[in-house]
Amino acid sequence: MTATHELTRNQALVFNALTKAESPLSAYTILDRLRDDGFRAPLQVYRALDKLLDYGMVHRLESLNAFVACAHPHCGEHGLIAFAICEKCGQVSEFSDVVIEEQVRDWTGQNGFKPSKTTVEIRGTCASCLNS
Amino acid sequence: MTATHELTRNQALVFNALTKAESPLSAYTILDRLRDDGFRAPLQVYRALDKLLDYGMVHRLESLNAFVACAHPHCGEHGLIAFAICEKCGQVSEFSDVVIEEQVRDWTGQNGFKPSKTTVEIRGTCASCLNS
DNA sequence: ACTGATATGTTATCTTATTACATAAGTTGC
DNA sequence: GCAACTTATGTAATAAGATAACATATCAGT
């Protein structure tokens, strides 16, 4: 089962930019990096991002207004994903946590709340930045 | 033990606006609501919000770029707080969850990550909006 | 070729947040 | 009191993030 989507030119360019990047990129940073490829307007980036988010190939970091390529090799279905964001170096670690997921399901179940998307972001300082 | 802080005029006005509001407010909405009280520039709001966030009396909803007064009567120290945000009516429920908190502590401990702030936001549809 | 859906290009605009600089008000030590 | 310092304010300008509106193009199916 390959969850890979057929990407359009713009989507591929944006996805590529994110994959090559070491850390999250803002939409406008992506735009700047794709000027040479013919990108001229923010909307070109946002439209591509929308689709990539849809496909689950890219995540949005709400507390950063930035985007990262999904860390999973073949994206598609994964459960709740959490991010640890280093405020020093900008590095982001992505991990999925079934316990948190279940805890969220518990609360929403008990409160009759139908969840669509859950954001878990831990801001702080990563191990290597602490040793320096 | 009263964790209440002595608020300046601007801080009190902003806190009041948030307390009276039924749902989260953006900084610019707060600004508009405080025009009659002499507010003229966004910075007046942002500066007050910064302090109130510091004091823990106000929370920022990252996925909404908006702010709410803390639901706890005497704010100050509370553990991890999660938010359930209804995308239909805008209502926000605040709850604290020790299991998620512990799960976060587990991951950060094992990875040598020093957390400063953790965001948990569940977007979806609330019970009353589902019945209508 | 005709139709409908999806993707693109471009301009303008809106919303959110910060920088820079000037002024006022409160606190501490003398 | 007043000098030195810190904190709060006021105001203007601008940066950064996101969307609306409208025109054009590309592609699949019939």
Image: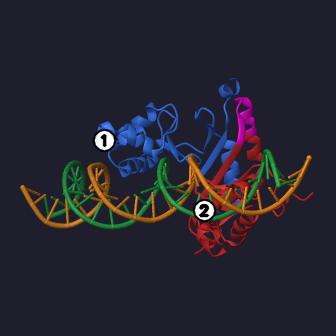
Chain colours: A red, B blue, C green, D orange
Seen in the picture, residue C26 relative to B84 is either above or below; the reply is below
Q: Nearer the viewer, residue A39 or D26?
A: D26
Q: Nearer the viewer, residue A13 or A4?
A: A13
Residue at which label 2 appears: A27
Amino acid found under the numbered disc labelled 1: Arg
The secondary element bearing badge 2 is classed as helix
Magenta-tinted stretch: A105-116
Discs 1 and 2 share one subunit: no
Amino acid found under the numbered disc labelled 2: Ala
Q: Measuring from the top left, give residue B29's x and y in whole percent.
A: 44, 41
Q: If the image is split into quadrants, where does the N terminus of chain B sit? A: top left
Q: Residue at x 59, y 61 (%)?
A: A42
Badge number at residue B9 = 1
Number of numbered tags placed on the structure image = 2
- Chain ID, mark 2: A
| Dot 2 alpha-carbon crowd within 10 angstroms: few under 14, some 14 to 19, many 20 or more | some
Q: Measuring from the top left, give residue B80's x and y in whole percent.
A: 60, 45
| Dot 1 alpha-carbon crowd within 10 angstroms: few under 14, some 14 to 19, many 20 or more | few
- The reply to whether the magenta stretch includes residue A104 is no
